[in-house]
Image: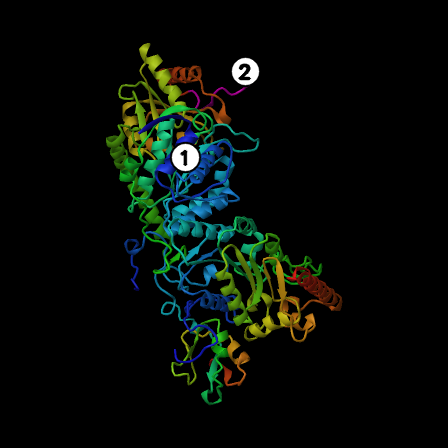
């Protein structure tokens, strides 16, 4: 959908949402640390994906590894802390 | 059409059955209890196919109605006094969410001290909540107003909640002969509720959300203001349609009786209007030109009608069955405010009468007309007067 | 998706929500909706999750959701279910999703009412142990000894003195068909419990521990570890009560409560005496829980 709201005439009759937050809120800007991934070390257990509170880890279709959604990742570091292979490192966002 | 001897409460129950309310969530409170008890009977007997939720408080009653209406169900609830006050937060919620919940409120005094008798403080305290507000005078009107309330509330151009009031005991418990319309007549007048939006697993949305100052809160409130303004015409239109079907009409937003040539007029809402009519008939026989303007809809306020009245009549007494401390009777205040823009403003006097269920008798009403005639001759004495108050001078 | 994932692939919570980094509650809803699926209607009162989905016209939650007044999560869920029933709409989960404040304090009347009426709802209390959305004020679910802004420490040692109110035991007392605790560090367990709840008709209550880095003053990356410690120290035991029968998950090795408490700044002020007192409380509660399991076991 994605109707652009300009005036009250564009509004629905009540505060009823019609879009998710993928485009609207790029929370990646919150980061002070960013996760860096070493695919060669990855065990493909998907534990990082399982525990990401920000839905910012995507498992590749072919199962060869993960991709970070840096538009939204807030850099909490849970993935790095939980990864059994230690293939994710948190690096300062500089 | 069936003619039954019923009271205001049962009229409300019959109306909720006729409109085919789908979800009823209500909590008992004197003197409303008979409404919900009769509905429970209707559901138990199978006459009414509603889901009846025995909620544990009035606050939950309105919460459940709001939620059910959000799914697209036609909802109904009833309460009074303390219960209405407890729901107050959610009255704002229902209108903000633009849900056509319909409620009957039995006008009862607020505590302390405890009083179960007629007083309009409870519903008046809701005036800012964005609900369409009807005040009924008779049992027949109570039944009809509830049906009309759904028609207006559910109109897709409106989509606002509405309540219909009845005075405690004077209307809730007094039996009158009432024409109960046929189910088919009501079905034709009021088709099934078609919500503008609903909680639907096939079309997910977030209802309620959050909005910041620079975003859309103010505009969403503006939409409510517009909808309430539009409801005026819808109320009159629905009334006309109902009159065609039943022959009954209640005078629109301001129900006037013998005001065309009146020298003085009393304004009031609720059952005391019936007493006033009796007095008018009596005094008219004596040659006194008296009239009544009964507020049938308090929201939207009948501003146009009052301005027209103010142009005709120069002495008006507004009777309030409640009071806004620090100001005056709320009906009085709003009538005054409506008249402000007139070039020649009528003299308006506030009579505070019947508070806490104190009886408003024919003698009292005659006294008030007397006072208005004196005011017409010699000008306003005092702006506000508490009628039949036990003052040291009187007792 | 060709790959076998530990949970269903579909994301019913979108990225871009306003949750704090490392928020346990964010993970909780992501997991819960994977367990319950698209045929779910949510009622969410004032709480972190009323704000995290973003501002109108955007919402991170991809199922129909009714945002409600604070104390009305359960009453609203009752209303949703009544309307679905009235309309003959079947096979839809009604999920009331509320914080500990909205469940055990201001919302407890509505919760008690809804479950007493045996309304067919799943009520999940995501327990971050304080009124987090309004800035970390104490709730009845705040554990004993914790700092919050309304139980600050100070010279007078005003940390929370009262033990944590047990929402789970209150629900058990209502004799509802299914009650359980969960913890976001064990998402598979949480999912299983939700799916079990969804298969039962009537009121179901699950209370899921969600560590809150902001309110607990803990390291965001340690959220999952902290949740694990809560369970491994018996501070937040994982148990179910199904038709009155208790089933308690026993940790392989019980760790001292201190190990859990010291991961969080909200307990930093506690000295040996308080730590021992808390260990004592945890031990007593754990022993009582095991006795309940014994007492209610099916013969």
* Badge 2: residue crowd in 10 Å (few <14, some 14–19, many ≥20): few
Residue B393 percent location from the top left of the image? 54, 15
Residue lying at 41% horizontally and 67% vertically, measured from the top left: C12
Q: Can see residue B288?
A: yes
Q: Is residue B390 magenta?
A: yes
Q: Chain of mark 1?
A: B
Looking at the rendered structure, which numbered label has been put on residue B393? 2
**Pointer 2 with pointer 1, Cβ within 8 A:** no
Q: Give the residue pinned by disc 1.
A: B13
For the residues labelled 2 and 1, the Cα–Cα distance comes to 45 Å
Q: Is residue B324 visible?
A: no
Let me know if marks 2 and 1 both belong to one chain. Answer: yes
Q: How many marks?
A: 2
Q: Is residue C4 above or below residue B85?
A: below
- Identify the image's colour scheme: rainbow, by chain, secondary structure or one colour: rainbow
Q: x, y percentage for residue B313?
A: 30, 22
- What's the chain of the residue with tag 2? B
Q: Which SS type dominates the magenta stretch?
A: loop
Eye-nearest disc, 2 or 1: 1
Residue furthest right as drawn: C273
For residue A82, what is the image quadrant?
A: bottom right
Secondary structure beneath label 2 = loop
Q: Which mark is residue B199?
A: none
Query: Residue B100 appears in which quarter of the rendering?
Result: top left
| Start-end of magenta stretch | B381-395
Residue sitting nearer the eye, C104 or B395? C104
Residue at coordinates 65% horizontally, 67% vertically from top-left? C235
Sequence order check, earlier mark of 2 and 1: 1
| Position of residue C91 measured from the top left corner of the image (x, y, whole percent) | 41, 59
Quadrant (top left, top right, bottom left, bottom right) of the C terminus of chain B: top right
Question: Residue C1, percent across and down?
Answer: 39, 78
Q: Is residue B393 left or right of residue B221?
A: right
């Amino acid at each position: 959908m994605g109707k652009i709201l300009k005036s009250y005439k564009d509004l629905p009759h009540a505060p009823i949402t019609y879009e998710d937050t993928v485009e609207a809120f790029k929370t990646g800007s919150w980061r002070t640390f960013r996760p860096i991934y070493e695919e060669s070390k990855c065990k493909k257990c998907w534990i990082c994906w399982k525990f990401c509170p920000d839905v910012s880890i995507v498992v590749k279709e072919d199962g060869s590894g993960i991709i970070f959604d840096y538009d939204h990742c807030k850099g909490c570091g849970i993935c790095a802390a939980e990864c059994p292979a230690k293939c994710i490192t948190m690096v300062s966002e500089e | 059409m069936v003619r039954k001897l019923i009271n205001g409460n049962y009229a409300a129950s019959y109306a909720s059955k006729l409109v085919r309310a789908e979800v009823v969530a209500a909590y008992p409170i004197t003197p409303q209890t008979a409404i919900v008890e009769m509905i429970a009977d209707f559901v138990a007997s199978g006459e009414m196919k509603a889901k009846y939720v025995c909620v544990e408080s009035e606050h939950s009653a309105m919460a459940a109605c709001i939620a059910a209406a959000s799914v697209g169900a036609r909802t109904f609830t009833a309460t009074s006094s303390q219960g209405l006050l407890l729901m107050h937060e959610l009255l704002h919620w229902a209108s903000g969410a633009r849900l056509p919940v319909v409620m009957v409120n039995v006008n009862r005094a607020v505590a302390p001290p405890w009083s179960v008798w007629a007083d309009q403080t409870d519903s008046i305290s809701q005036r800012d909540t964005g609900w369409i507000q009807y005040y009924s005078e008779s049992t027949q009107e109570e039944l009809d107003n509830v049906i009309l309330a759904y028609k207006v509330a559910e109109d897709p151009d409106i989509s606002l909640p509405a309540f219909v009031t009845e005075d405690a005991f004077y209307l809730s418990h007094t039996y009158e002969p009432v024409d109960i319309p046929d189910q088919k007549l009501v079905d034709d007048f009021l088709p099934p509720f078609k919500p503008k939006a609903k909680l639907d697993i096939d079309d997910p949305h977030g209802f309620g959300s959050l909005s910041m100052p620079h975003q859309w809160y103010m505009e969403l409130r503006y939409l409510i203001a517009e909808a309430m303004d539009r409801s005026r015409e819808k109320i009159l239109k629905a009334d006309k349609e109902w009159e065609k079907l039943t022959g009954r009409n209640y005078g629109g937003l301001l129900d006037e009786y013998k005001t065309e040539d009146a020298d003085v007029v009393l304004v009031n809402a609720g059952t005391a209007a019936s007493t006033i009519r009796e007095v008018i008939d009596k005094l008219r026989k004596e040659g006194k030109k008296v009239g009544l303007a009964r507020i049938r809809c308090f929201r939207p306020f009948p501003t146009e009608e009052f301005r027209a009245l103010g142009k005709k009549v120069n002495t008006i007494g507004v009777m309030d069955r409640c009071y806004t401390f620090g100001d005056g009777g709320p009906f009085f205040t709003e009538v005054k405010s409506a008249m402000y823009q007139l070039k020649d403003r009528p003299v308006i006097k506030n009579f505070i009468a019947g508070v806490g269920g104190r009886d408003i008798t024919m003698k009292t009403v005659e006294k008030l007309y007397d006072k208005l005639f004196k005011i017409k001759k010699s000008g306003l004495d005092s702006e506000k007067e508490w009628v039949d108050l036990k003052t040291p001078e009187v007792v | 998706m060709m790959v076998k994932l530990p949970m269903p692939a579909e994301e019913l919570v979108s990225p871009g929500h306003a949750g704090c980094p490392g928020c346990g509650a964010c993970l909780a809803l992501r997991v819960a909706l994977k367990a319950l699926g698209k045929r779910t209607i949510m009622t969410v009162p004032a709480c972190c999750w009323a704000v995290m989905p973003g501002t109108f016209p955007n919402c991170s939650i991809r199922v129909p959701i009714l945002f409600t007044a604070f104390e009305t999560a359960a009453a609203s869920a009752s209303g949703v279910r009544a309307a679905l029933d009235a309309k003959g709409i079947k096979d839809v989960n009604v999920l009331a999703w509320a914080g500990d404040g909205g469940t055990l304090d201001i919302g407890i009347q509505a919760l008690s009412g809804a479950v007493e009426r045996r309304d067919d709802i799943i009520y999940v209390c995501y327990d971050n142990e304080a009124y987090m959305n309004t800035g970390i004020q104490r709730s009845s679910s705040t554990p004993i000894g914790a700092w919050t802004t309304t139980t600050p420490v100070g010279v007078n040692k005003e940390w929370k003195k009262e033990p944590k109110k047990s929402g789970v035991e209150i629900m058990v007392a209502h004799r509802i068909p299914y009650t359980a605790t969960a913890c976001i560090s064990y998402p598979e367990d949480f999912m299983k419990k939700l799916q079990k709840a969804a298969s039962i008709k009537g009121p179901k209550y699950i209370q899921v521990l969600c560590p809150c880095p902001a309110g607990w003053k803990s390291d965001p990356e340690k959220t999952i570890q902290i949740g694990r410690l809560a369970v491994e120290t018996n501070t937040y035991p994982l148990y179910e009560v199904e038709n009155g029968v208790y089933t308690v998950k026993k940790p392989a090795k019980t760790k001292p409560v201190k190990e859990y408490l010291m991961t969080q700044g909200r307990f930093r002020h506690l000295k040996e005496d308080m730590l021992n007192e808390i260990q004592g409380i945890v031990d007593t509660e754990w022993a009582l829980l095991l006795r309940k399991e014994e007492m209610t076991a099916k013969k």
